[in-house]
Amino acid sequence: MRDRIEAIYARDSRRVLATLIRLLGDFELAEEALHEAFVCAVEQWPEKGVPANPSAWLVSTGRFRAIDQIRRRARFERVTRQMGLESAGSIGSIESTDQYEDAEVLEDDQLRLIFTCCHPSLAPEAQVAMTLREVCGLTTEEIARAFLTTPSTLAQRIVRAKNKIRDARIPYEVPGPSQLGERLDEVLNVVYLVFNEGYSASAGETVTRRHLADEAIRLGRRLLELLPEPEVLGLLALMLLHDARRNARMNNDGDLIPLDKQDRALWNRAQIAEGADLVTRALNTRAFGAYTLQAAIAAVHCEAPSAEATDWVQIAGLYEALLQHAHTPVIELNYAVAIAMRDGPAAGLVRVDALLEDRHLRKYHLAHAARADFLRRLDRPEEALAAYEQALSLAEQGPERRFLQARTEQMAALLK
């Protein structure tokens, strides 16, 4: 039973939290209510069985626990003022609502929470941190690692953002059509960051965090229903095309398998077809952007029958177009890899060496890993060894560390 409850927590806790935030209007109170609800589940479900709708049960239990807590602490008037509730009648409306029994309402609550976390009055870094914490359930430590900052700094950033939402009474809603477009860029960025953490975990002992990737794709589908803009098509296509390779990206021991060594029979062809159709629709609009171009690159990889047959000329050309839309150091690095595959490792090495002079990439392990790979292919094992060691010192994901360790030992053996 404990395993089943833990599985329900992993699957439903963020949806339940989003609805509790909507009902209670307070992030901290909702998080306490979520915790209380799962404590009750651990106590009651082994004896009474799992309810038919566990999410609704958890929302109901958490909601009443929160109301009991408000009253028990005799802070009713002060808390209701903080929550923006004017009277006991408001508490009554919380008690009486039953909309959370509708699964679609639970999903919409997550979208409301994302748009709230991405409100333009919040700083961009606060938007992302809030969404990763509240919508995706990442720990403060995990988010801090992704932001290359300390957990205490990150925690303060999230608290300030929550206070601003509360004090400014930012509405908990998906904005209307006139505001939806201007808020969409931030939301797409956050959904993609969630997917990236699911597709390639920043730390830990697994290559992926599947529930995060699944959640990002689900949110992408929901956004597409809400606003079928070209870049929504492009982002969903990008996520589907990357995720289609998940079963081929690690072996039974959990070790990383690089793209050129993957068994392409394990790729999800139905997902690739859906992603390719979406990216074609986005390209046909001629109003696409960075997500669509990245999806087009992913489609070229997915449609190649083998690693050797990959059309690197087309991929390099797409990266050149992409850099016109999003000139970031990471995209420059990926372009350098494409150039190395098209023109040879020496051409890629020149670009990566120039990039590593940029302070943004000096602590990025994949930049050093790419440099090490170019040097290995150029038969310069001593320099490759140093670059692999540098990459290894910066990597925090277990499978990536094992891969880099193996390459380090391979280079060291060549020097004996």
Image (cartoon, rainbow, N blue to C red):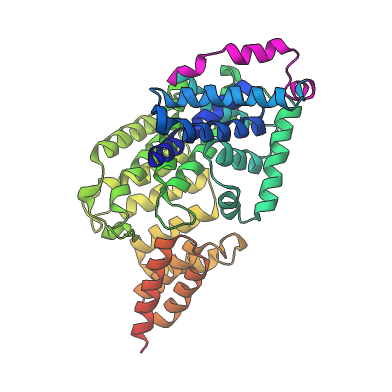
Q: Is residue 236 left or right of residue 159?
A: left
Q: Quadrant of residue 91?
A: top right
Split into 4 quadrants, where in the image is the C terminus?
A: bottom left
Q: Residue at x 39, y 80 (%)?
A: 381
Tell whether 208 sits left or right of 266: right
Q: Quadrant of residue 262?
A: bottom left
Q: Which residues are magenta?
A: 77-103
Task: Reply yes or no: does residue 299 show up in magenta.
Answer: no
Q: Residue furthest right?
A: 78
Q: Quadrant of residue 160?
A: top right
Q: Nearer the viewer, residue 154 or 243?
A: 154
Residue furthest to the bottom in view is 416
Compared to residue 214, the image places residue 142 above or below, namely below
Q: Position of residue 24 (x, y in %)?
A: 64, 23
Task: Tell me the residue at 45%/42% (across/down).
Answer: 195
Give x and y (percent) for residue 142: 55, 51
Q: Residue at x 55, y 28 (%)?
A: 18
Q: How many marks?
A: 0
- At which x and y percent is residue 65? 61, 26
Q: Position of residue 125 (x, y in %)?
A: 64, 44
Most foreground residue, 192 or 303: 192
The residue nearer to you, when weighing 254 against 341, is: 254
Considering only vertical position in the picture, is 189 above or below 54?
below
